[in-house]
Image (cartoon, rainbow, N blue to C red):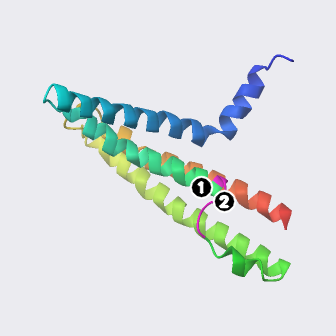
């Protein structure tokens, strides 16, 4: 069996980035929730900081999950109607939906960058862990860019298949 080089692992990481990040984030969330339940049951003491991490990691989890769904073409759609249309109309609706989706996430990216900038400028810190709030909020612009990339990637593949 040939030895796999760095390029192989890099390509694997890039093509499975969402799955890897979702696995890591979900593992952290489950571990924190489990540890919190155990400490609450046995020690009668709740770890308050875990709630802060769990709630804010859901932002990252949602964005990575949405990007993965776009990558796998798993979002709800009206494909049964579009597939009944002639090939030219299918291409039009593919381009139209791609432009619309990219526009929505570009707007989300713009306003979330503005939000992150405000968090940095105001030096807002979290209550429990006293870390910068923008670290949690950064999941929205990062996820928006990832979603835009995956939407365009999927649209190009779909366009070639038509």
Which image quadrant is residue 8 in? Answer: top right
Residue at 37% x, 38% y is 135
Foreground: 55 or 113?
55
* Secondary structure, magenta segment, majority class: loop
Under circle 1, the secondary element is helix
Residue at 72% x, 71% y is 94
Where residue 78 appears, as percent x and y from the top left, is: 64, 76
Question: Residue at the left extreme?
Answer: 44
Residue tagged by mark 2?
73
Q: In the drawing, does residue 107 fall left or right of residue 58?
A: right
Under circle 2, the secondary element is loop
Q: In the drawing, does residue 83 fall left or right of residue 102?
A: right
Residue at 78% x, 57% y is 157
Foreground: 157 or 30?
30
Residue tagged by mark 1?
69
Which image quadrant is residue 152 in? Answer: bottom right
> Pointers 2 and 1 in contact (CB under 8 A)?
no
Residue density around tag 2, few if under 14, some if 14–19, many if 20 or more, within 10 Å: some
The answer to whether one can see residue 162 in this image is yes
The answer to whether one can see residue 123 in this image is no
Q: Which residues are magenta?
A: 71-76
Where residue 56 appears, as percent x and y from the top left, is: 34, 44
Foreground: 151 or 122?
151
Q: Is residue 44 above or below residue 26?
A: above
Quarter of the image where the N terminus is located = top right
Where residue 72 appears, as percent x and y from the top left, is: 66, 54
Residue at 76% x, 26% y is 7
Q: Is residue 114 above or below residue 120?
A: below
Q: Is residue 108 above or below residue 49?
A: below
How far is disc 2 from disc 1 in space, using C-alphas?
6 Å
Q: Total of numbered circles in the picture?
A: 2
Where residue 111 appears, as percent x and y from the top left, is: 42, 58
């Amino acid at each position: 069996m040939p030895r796999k080089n760095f390029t192989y692992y890099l390509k694997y990481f890039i093509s499975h980035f969402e799955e890897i990040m979702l696995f890591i984030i979900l593992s952290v969330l489950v571990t924190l929730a489990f540890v919190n339940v155990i400490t609450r049951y046995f020690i009668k003491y709740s770890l308050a900081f875990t709630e802060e991490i769990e709630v804010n990691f859901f932002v990252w989890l949602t964005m990575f999950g949405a990007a993965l769904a776009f990558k796998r073409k798993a979002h709800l759609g009206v494909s049964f109607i579009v597939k009944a249309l002639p090939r030219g109309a299918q291409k039009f609706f593919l381009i139209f939906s791609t432009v619309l989706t990219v526009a929505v996430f570009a707007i989300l990216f713009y306003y979330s960058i503005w939000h992150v900038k405000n968090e940095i400028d105001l030096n807002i810190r979290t209550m429990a862990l006293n870390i910068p709030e923008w670290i949690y909020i950064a999941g929205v612009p990062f996820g928006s860019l990832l979603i835009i990339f995956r939407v365009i990637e999927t649209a190009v593949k779909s366009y070639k298949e038509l």
